[in-house]
Image (spheres, rainbow, N blue to C red):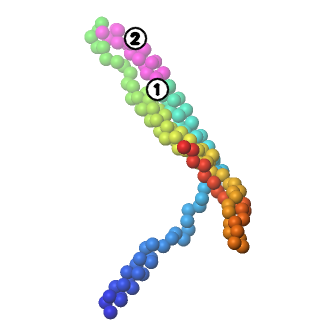
Amino acid sequence: MKKIIMGTMLLITANATFCQQNNPSPILTKQDYMKKSKHQKTAAILLFGGGFLMSATSLIIFTVKGSEDVINIIPGIITGDPEPQNHYTGATILLITGATSMLSSIPLFIASGKNKGKSISLSLKNQIAPQLQKNSFVYRTIPSLTIKINL
């Protein structure tokens, strides 16, 4: 009796754990991949452009403040107090943020290219397939989703 109950419990558990999904994820179409690629590329361009502007602005600030420090250090050397007057924290933060923004755009450019490649390789076509009908093969067209793999 114990063996029957244990066997039944094992079958119920196995049946419950190896079932298919009730709501499978939707299949993405060619238009979905193209739209996703376009959005990723736009985000990557915005990140790169914004990072470039931030880095360029920080370099301009470094140049202006550096020239002021050079002008102020020369009299300071004569008087014995050669410390720079400007602090570069704002420009440094701007430079680091800009560089990080430009570097974070690289994975988006890569993902955009991959999604564009997926959209190019997917297409709907009518393909001819042999089917058995009354003891002979008949070639019929079947609508199908084709995937082109570039080697």
Residue 88 locus on image (x, y percent): 39, 25
Q: From where the camera sits, is residue 36 visible?
A: no
Q: Image point 45% across, 72% down: which residue?
A: 18
Of labels 2 and 1, earlier in sequence is 1
- Which kind of residue does numbered mark 2 sit on? Ile
**Looking at the rendering, in which quadrant would you find the C terminus?**
top right
Residue 102 locus on image (x, y percent): 49, 34
Asked which quadrant contains residue 81, the reply is top left
Q: Image point 69% across, 72% down: which residue?
A: 135
Which structural element holds mark 2? helix
The residue that mark 1 highlights is 58
Whether 112 is among the magenta residues is no
Which numbered circle lies on residue 86? none
Q: Real-space Cα distance between discs 2 and 1?
A: 20 Å
Mark 1, residues whose alpha carbon is within 10 Å: few (<14), some, or many (≥20)?
many
Q: Image point 57% across, 36% down: which residue?
A: 45
> In this picture, is 89 found above or below 72?
below
Task: State the residue in front, 12 or 133.
Answer: 133
**Looking at the rendering, in which quadrant would you find the N terminus?**
bottom left
Asked which quadrant contains residue 42, the reply is top right
Q: Nearer the viewer, mark 2 or mark 1?
A: 1
- Which kind of residue does numbered mark 1 sit on? Ser
The residue that mark 2 highlights is 71
Residue that sits furthest to the left in the current view: 80
Stretch in magenta: 59-77
Position of residue 56 in the picture relative to residue 72 (left or right): right
Residue 2 locus on image (x, y percent): 31, 90
Residue that sits furthest to the front in the current view: 135
